Amino acid sequence: MYLMGFVIKLLAPFKDKMYCRQKGSKQIWKQLAAADKNASYIWIHAASLGEFEQGRPIIEAIKEKNSQCKILLTFFSSSGYEVRKKYPLADIVCYLPIDTSRNAKRFVNSIQIEKAIFIKYEFWKNLLSQLHKRGIPTYLVSSIFRENQLFFKPYGQPHRKVLTLFSHIFVQNESSKQLLQKININNVTVAGDTRCDRVTKIAQNAKQIPLIKSFSEDADVLVAGSTWERDEKIILRHFNQNPKLKLIVAPHEMSNRRLEILCNKIKRPYLKYSEATEENIRQAHCLIIDGFGLLSSIYQYGKIAYIGGGFGVGIHNTLEAAVWKIPIIFGPNYQKADEAKDLMTCGGAISVRNQEEYNDAVRFLLNDKNAGEQASTYVQTHAGSTNLIMNSIF
């Protein structure tokens, strides 16, 4: 942990994310000092933005149950904190300190915590130990466990001990529960994925985005969300050669340099959303989303969705697109996303490994009448996780 803190400081002048993390970390104790000393807080911790979206339905449900309840929301990654640092349902939003024993004690002593809820993959030993010692109920929600994780290795005993510090673990699937039972972790409930509740609510309350609607009218539109350069390579090669297809692309990172690289690869008329008007947007063939918070609603204007990350560390959120009754394409690295496997099984998604397979998938899905319906049905039938978790915790 001390080495991690040192590396972050060392890289901060050279890496935007590290710089934001280092800068924000200096404010943690000041932010916690401003907490209401006469109130207790429900602490929600999410590693980054994706985990926040899984925890968000729970925060909303807590506030619906008791609007006066205090919420402490923490992030480890700058990509989560910088986007959601002004999240209105949280009373305090701050970074999580590096998990040293000293920081853990100071953190838990700085604010009165009623319950702690960790999202998906967060196993900070010192913080969990401090919560456990104080008898604070601590939960892990929307988690997935796999046989190749350290917990299940012959030498994984120290890691297994960390799991015993949770009061209860809510997993997404039965196989995760069975793996935990093999190592004598039995305080487990299969509750599904809270993201299904989140995306369903987004779809139910969605508003029109007039500029996107104007761009998409009378056209086949592919919405490419959370893309990386390797995704864009095959997307743009196809797009540049198919004048009948329009493209909306929302890159995972939006630095000026990153957007410049993307724009240089586009050979047809394009426009950044921040520069779009009713007059110029109809002339564009490609719309680049250069701001946060729009993607989940933009999918409603697509005929097909492409979800990025599958040619790298793993695909991003497929459910945001599936709820809008549109079929999905993603790269080959989807094995850690159970919902992606399920969407492929039900016919709502296709995984591609190269340019040829991508071209074939786009051609096929533009003419398929059922794939989008299958994707949406999957989301609807898997909703309800939030209510199950809330009824167990509160």
Image: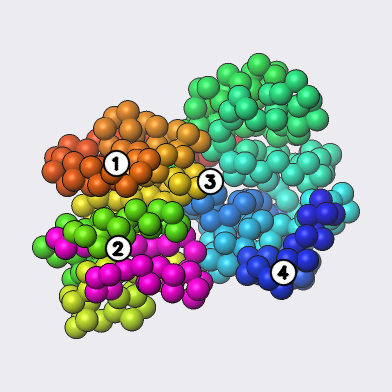
Q: Looking at the image, what colour scheme do you see?
A: rainbow
Mark 2 and mark 4: span between their CA atoms? Answer: 32 Å
Numbered badge on residue 248: 2
Mark 4 and mark 3: span between their CA atoms? Answer: 23 Å
Figure disc tally: 4
Mark positioned earlier in the residue sequence (1 or 3): 3
- Where residue 28 sits, quadrant-wise, is bottom right
Mark 4 and mark 1: span between their CA atoms? Answer: 40 Å
From the image, state whether disc 1 or disc 3 is nearer to you. Answer: 1
Local packing at callout 3 (Cα closer than 10 Å; few below 14, some 14-19, many 20+) is: few
Q: Amino acid at mark 2?
A: Ile
In the rendered view, does 205 fall on the left or right side of 369? right
Mark 2 and mark 1: span between their CA atoms? Answer: 20 Å
Mark 3 and mark 2: span between their CA atoms? Answer: 23 Å
Q: Amino acid at mark 3?
A: Val
- Residue 167 drawn at (x, y percent): 69, 33
Q: Which residue is mark 3?
A: 313
From the image, state whether disc 4 or disc 1 is nearer to you. Answer: 1
Let me know if residue 120 is in the magenta part.
Answer: no
In the rendered view, does 112 fall on the left or right side of 283? right
Q: Which residue is mark 4?
A: 12
- Residue 109 drawn at (x, y percent): 83, 55
User: Are dots 1 and 3 in contact, CB under 8 Å?
Assistant: no
Q: Which residue is mark 1?
A: 357
User: Are dots 4 and 1 in contact, CB under 8 Å?
Assistant: no
Label 3: element kind? loop
- Residue 327 drawn at (x, y percent): 26, 43
